[in-house]
Image (spheres, rainbow, N blue to C red):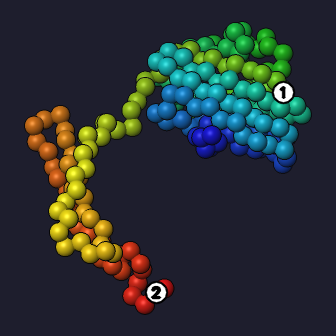
Amino acid sequence: MKHPMIAGVSPVAPGWNEYQILPKEAFLTAIKVTIPSIKGPVTVDLKKTASEYSIGLISPSDTTAIVGIPKRSFSTLNVIKVNDATIWNGTYGGGVNGIAWHGEDADYVKFKTAPGTWKFIALGTLPLRSPKPLPPRLRMTRCSTRNHGPLRPPCWTAHFFSAGPRFRSMSRPPMPLTGIIGPAGAI
């Protein structure tokens, strides 16, 4: 289970009578979480592509969910569908039993849902971002084994390789005895 806050799942009312799904997925393109609640498990399945953002929800009995489509994930948001019926195309149009308009703010287009199984699909343009470049390749080699007593671990050298012909090395010397056991005098 990924942390429920990444999927934006949190209670709004005591006892999970009402809860919200306001995703904060950042650069992730898929998240699936099942959160245990006093009313039963809440399952959220998020998927994001360059043209579609989907939220699958299984909501337990006796609950109301507020589902938010994150506007900031889109450069252009055109249509929102629930269970294959269009409910929003710039304004709320309704048309699906168990779904109600809950408003819109700078971050989300929000809907209230009754218990059950729901599939929200938002269509538009989603710029997919990567958090940072991929790390360089790493290779570890063992340093000389000379001067290693029975309590002194061997040292290691890390070699970082980039796409070019150069590489960097970084050695970790053996740790001092106090680093293994703790401060002097500690037992």
Q: Position of residue 34 (x, y in %)?
A: 70, 36
Instruction: Please give the name of the residue rendered at 85% of the width and 39% of the height, measured from the top-left corner.
Output: 39
Relative vertical location of residue 185 with respect to residue 162 in this rendering, above or below: below
Classed neighbour count for the residue bearing mark 2: other residues with Cα under 10 Å, few (<14), some (14–19), many (≥20): few
Instruction: Please give the name of the residue rendered at 31% of the width and 36% of the height, measured from the top-left corner.
Output: 134
Instruction: Please give the name of the residue rendered at 64% of the width and 27% of the height, measured from the top-left corner.
Output: 45
Q: Position of residue 92 (x, y in %)?
A: 71, 17
- Seen from the viewer's position, the closer of residues 121 and 158 is 158
Say which quarter of the image contains residue 8: top right
User: Please, which residue is most extreme toward the right here?
Assistant: 62
- Seen from the viewer's position, the closer of residues 171 and 84 is 171
Left/right placement of residue 118 relative to residue 183 reads: right
Quadrant in the picture for the N terminus: top right
User: Please, which residue is most extreme toward the left here?
Assistant: 165
Q: Could you say which disc has been placed on residue 115 in the image?
A: 1
- Seen from the viewer's position, the closer of residues 146 and 5 is 146
The type of residue carrying mark 2 is: Ala
Q: Secondary structure at mark 2?
A: loop
Count of numbered labels shown in the rendering: 2
Relative vertical location of residue 175 with respect to residue 126 in this rendering, above or below: below
Q: Could you say which disc has been placed on residue 186 in the image?
A: 2
The type of residue carrying mark 1 is: Pro
Tell me if I can see residue 132 in this picture: yes
Q: Which callout, 2 or 1, points to the residue nearer the camera?
A: 2
Instruction: Please give the name of the residue rendered at 71% of the width and 15% of the height, measured from the top-left corner.
Output: 82
Relative vertical location of residue 115 with respect to residue 143 in this rendering, above or below: above
Q: Secondary structure at mark 1?
A: loop
